[in-house]
Amino acid sequence: MDPEQESPASEPQPTESGADTVTQDEAQPAAQELGRVERPPAEQFQGKRRLLLVPLMFAPPAETEAGASDGQAIYDRYWDQVRTQIDALASGLGGLHRIYHESLVDGGQEGLDYLQMAYRHAHSFIQVRFHAGATLEATESIDLITETLDLQRCLMVPFTNDQVAARIQDWLAESTRARYEYIAGQIERTLQPDETGLLLINERHQVQFPPDIEVFYVAPPALDEYRRWVQNWIARQQQAEAAAMQHAATAAPEPGTDEDWPEESQE
């Protein structure tokens, strides 16, 4: 699967549809979702800072793989529903002012160009709102995000020394904490009173939002549907790998048979 997402932490569970709002005094680190998509009363949040939180999901694999077209249809439907909900929420909250996106180290047109290469669905969604006047903000530190990615790659290599593995794990945990603190700081510095921001970030993020920000977690119906599809896809891949390993084990020649040795060449 091609990632349009990355990284660890708590994963909220969706309701049937919609987005909900909850202050950070009520829930940290992630907001809860609303039961229905309705325009929130603007006067209720007047003067406050507001943040719409959209979970980034992995894109499905290429359609050459079995069942991938079903996943793509659900994935496309998810983004269509996200657009509908964001438009409804932003309209009720007085418009969309700032956009934040994980992995984005540049704002403005440079950031939009990066999204076009790396996050196709998010780019088409953000581009419309960017040209409508929303500011695309630099969201991450290039040093912190590259450090985190390098440490993740290190952990993909088998270690022969447990102490080295533990130190790398600790370093990654610290780097990840600093990364998400930086994102929270960017939002804190740039989102102004009576503004609405939009953050697109992986579901397992560890961002602790400033306590005075009202967070709306956007969870359209297709989100839960896509989660189930991904779980089933992973299960199918694991079953296929197990079957392949079993077949290889049964097809291998038994030790000590003539098949272990090449035939002698004829002079």
Image (cartoon, rainbow, N blue to C red):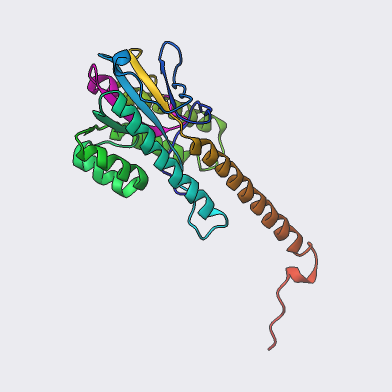
* Residue at horizontal 57 percent and vertical 39 percent from the top: 160
Quadrant of the rendered image containing residue 173: top left
From what the image shows, is residue 65 above or below residue 223? Answer: below
From what the image shows, is residue 112 above or below residue 9? Answer: below
From what the image shows, is residue 51 above or below residue 244? Answer: above
Is residue 198 within the magenta segment?
A: yes
Q: Quadrant of the C terminus?
A: bottom right
Viewer-proximal residue among 216 and 170: 216
Q: Is residue 265 left or right of residue 208?
A: right
Residue 136 x/y as whole percent = 24, 34
Residue 215 x/y as whole percent = 38, 21
Quadrant of the rendered image containing residue 137: top left
Viewer-proximal residue among 71 and 166: 71
Quadrant of the rendered image containing residue 18: top left
Viewer-proximal residue among 197 and 61: 197
Residue 74 x/y as whole percent = 49, 46
Is residue 167 within the magenta segment?
A: no
Q: Is residue 143 left or right of residue 35?
A: left
* Residue at horizontal 25 percent and vertical 28 percent from the top: 95
* Magenta residues, start to end: 186-206
Q: Is residue 130 left or right of residue 205?
A: left
Mark yes or no: residue 113 visible: yes
* Residue at horizontal 27 percent and vertical 14 percent from the top: 46
